[in-house]
Amino acid sequence: MSHGPDTLAPAADLTEIAAGWLAALDAGTADSDAFEAWRSADVRHAIAFAEVAQTWQDLNDLRLVPCSPETADPLQAFPPIEAHRPDRRRVLRAAVALGAVVVAGGGFAIRAAARNKADTAIGQRRTVSDNPAFSVDLNTDSSITWKDGAPVRLWLERGEIAIRLGPAHRLSLMTPGGTFHLASGVYNARLRGASCELAVLQGQGTLGDGGRTFVPGEVALATAGQASLRPRDADLAADLGRITAWQRDTLVLGGESLDYALAEMNRYRAQKIVIGDPALSRLRIGGTFATTDAREFLEALRTSFGVKATAGADGNIVLTHD
């Protein structure tokens, strides 16, 4: 995408290129080093990007301007536009000002367009709280991006998170299953394939615009923009406790199959625990186990069911009858 001073693209092409960079930065897909190389190649690249970024910001601000259909006069909505060409001094002032912002602010235009990002590796947990409006706890093998605003926009791209929204704040949670609009409160969101499971612990949320409101104690599964509610457990506190147990580095099982138990435990392990004897799949497991160390879980299988755990050459653990 880089153009040197002697091979500068026409103004229209420069605007299109700058808009492409802005869109990529906004989507979180841009290569920051490549962008910096392009912008630094010529001051006119920097000016083109600054103009596109300002137009983008102006359009976003315009979206937030209240306008009453009953009182708005379409002829007075916008002042007449005067055609003019910027003089050389104005262009140079803009270039100098942009350079000062980039040097002093560390790339203000990039930060205005780009998403923030956080992720965790397998077995890792992390808390993000650099925004006073909200904090997010990331479970194992999870990834999020977000953009500040009113409301904050947060993309759950992988894994599971806990969200805490401060008073008077709102957040739009974008997931493969649909977009949740959340009021201040506490939530747990987990991706399940192309769907997203949202548990409301405090506050309330909706799926899409004008959708059904979810209240504390409800667990909604969003798929292709449609939501279904999971039946409530007889003991609501226990049900929500199982959902949020990962925040205490524990896994709570209530008689689920060994297949399910291993799928949950393996989320926290680089080396997996696998079933070597298909008959073991029928076992039902209950109890509370640490997710940071599988030895307690394996010992419970041995003492309760006579299951033997053998470490393989690849580091995985194979379960068989003792």
Image (cartoon, grey):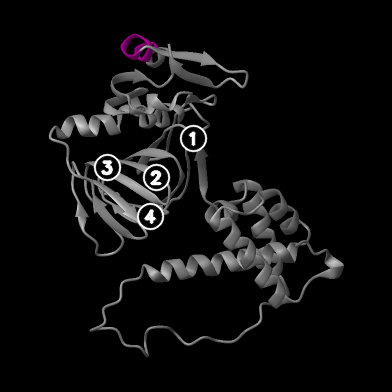
Q: CA distance from mark 2 to mark 4?
A: 9 Å
User: Which quadrant of the structure image shows residue 280?
Assistant: top left
Count residues near mark 2 (Cα–Cα under 10 Å), then give few for <14, some for 14-19, many for 20+: some
Q: Nearer the viewer, residue 50 or 119?
A: 119
Residue at the (45%, 18%) spot, across then down? 320
Q: CA distance from mark 4 to mark 3?
A: 14 Å
Q: Residue furthest right?
A: 6
Residues shaded magenta: 299-305
The numbered dot on residue 141 is 1
The numbered dot on residue 199 is 3
Residue 166 coordinates in the image, percent (x, y): 29, 42
Secondary structure state at the residue bearing disc 2: strand
First along the sequence among labels 1 and 4 = 1
The numbered dot on residue 167 is none
Please say whether residue 170 is visible from this viewpoint.
Answer: no
Q: Which residue is mark 2?
A: 192
Mark 1 or 2: in front is 2
Q: CA distance from mark 3 to mark 1?
A: 19 Å
Callout 1–callout 2 Cβ contact below 8 Å? no
Q: Nearer the viewer, residue 222 or 262?
A: 262
Q: Residue furthest left?
A: 234
**Amino acid bearing label 4:** Gly
Question: Mainly helix, strand or loop, the magenta region?
Answer: helix
Q: Quadrant of the N terminus?
A: bottom right
Q: CA distance from mark 3 to mark 2?
A: 13 Å
Q: Nearer the viewer, residue 46 or 118?
A: 118
First along the sequence among labels 3 and 1 = 1
